[in-house]
Image (spheres, grey):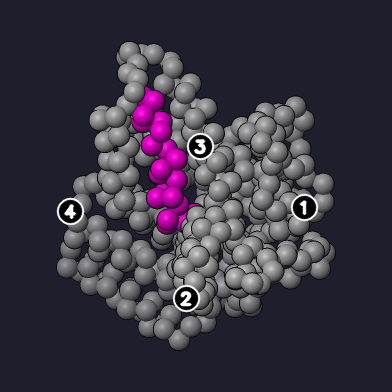
Amino acid sequence: MPNYIALAIPFFFLLIGVELWVARRRRAAVYRLNDALVDLSCGITQQIFVVFFAAALIGAYVFVYERFRLVSFPGGSPWPWVIAFLAVDFTYYWWHRLSHRVNFLWAAHVVHHQSEDYNLAVALRQAVATVWTILPFHLPLALVGVPPAVFITVDSFSTLYQFWIHTELVGKLGWFERVFNTPAQHRVHHAVNPRYLDRNYAATLCIWDRLFGTFQEESEAPVYGLVKPLGNFNPFWAQAHRWVELWRQSQAEPTLRGKLRVWFGPPTFAGTGLPDHVPPPVDRRTAVKHDPPLSPALARWLFAQLALTVIGTTAFLFFAERLDLAQRLFAAALLLLGVAASGGLLEKRRWAVPLEVGRWAAVGLVAVLW
């Protein structure tokens, strides 16, 4: 069946272009190249890994559906679609809520919250590990008889819906906000203002937040990012940093109970015998973003490389099934090395230039030998 996310990539960038145009008309600064580049690099990394994970993820769902489903619907029945729409949204709410309250789930999900900007590119800042952490929440749909094709379609469109709510340029939407998730509601979710933390977990419908007491109206200017800012533009470190922190914290705990609490407790847990972390007050007017200077020449190079990497990743997503495993691994490695080099150049790492030169040399060699 079609890969709806891959098919939507041109529309993602078209809408990002529209957002940039509207922001310029309003004289609003909603994008920074360095931050947006890492947003897209994280999304590229996730999509490349999904190519290799997809068979196992879909296979797990199909296995439960074929062996253990409790209900079978007749062909053409609308009920699988109705159940899938509500159940995908409901299970997303609970996965999302737990991903903010359980450390090992937060270690995966934190990637999506690292950006200190809020724009459509942030929607594409995704974590490699979340496709695995959400899988157990999806398997009950297989048990109640939602066919794999129906589940994949509804889940894909749920993801696509969430793209447009990542913008500062759309205000409140009146009656629509009573039922559906909107940019104003999701701005609250991405903010680190103390009153906004751990609120508005919705995907498409905001009724779950209202029903379970996690809804918060937007009432003050949001400050975006993490309570403890990442302060780094390496997309691979963005994927790994919280796992490393948890490992180090668990190693420092003297008891098994303390070690387990590091992984299964809330992100506010600072250590056995220590008070929980308390989020500091923040103010949009005084908040300082991680924004090291970027020369015009480097900015142009990184932008050009990003464009080529996006094109290459899109082609990879469409044609990966026609490649054998060795070809897939080689193509993925070249794309991921580009992601790594971009992050290294942004962070001014010594290894970044040799990596970039070596990567392009490999590309040239392949082009000659092909």
Q: Position of residue 305 (x, y in %)?
A: 44, 66
Q: How many numbered discs, if any?
A: 4
Label 1 secondary element: helix
Q: Quadrant of residue 60?
A: top left
Residue at 51% x, 58% y: name it: 264
Left or right: 296, with 184 as reference point: left
Three-letter code for the amino acid on which mark 3 is drawn: Thr
Residue 103 horizontal side relative to residue 51, left or right: right
Q: Which residue is mark 3?
A: 91
| In the image, residue 174 above or below residue 341 | above
| Magenta stretch, residue numbers | 125-146
Q: Which residue is mark 1?
A: 195
Going from the N terminus, do you reach mark 3 or mark 2 first? 3
**Viewer-side label of 1, 4:** 1
Q: Quadrant of residue 139?
A: top left
Name the residue located 40 percent from the left edge and 50 percent from the top edge: 132
Task: Return the mark for residue 136.
Answer: none
Q: Is residue 185 above or below residue 346?
A: above
Q: Nearer the viewer, residue 298 or 91?
A: 91
The N terminus: image quadrant: top left
Q: What amino acid is at disc 1? A: Arg
Residue at the disc numbered 2 = 251
Q: Position of residue 260 (x, y in %)?
A: 48, 63
Sequence-wise, the earlier of marks 4 and 3 is 3
In the rendered image, the vertical position of residue 140 relative to residue 167, given as above or below: above
Can residue 234 be seen? no
> Is tag 3's residue or tag 1's residue first in the polypeptide sequence?
3
Q: Give the quarter of the image for residue 49.
A: bottom left
Dot 4 corresponds to which residue? 324
Secondary structure at numbered mark 2: helix
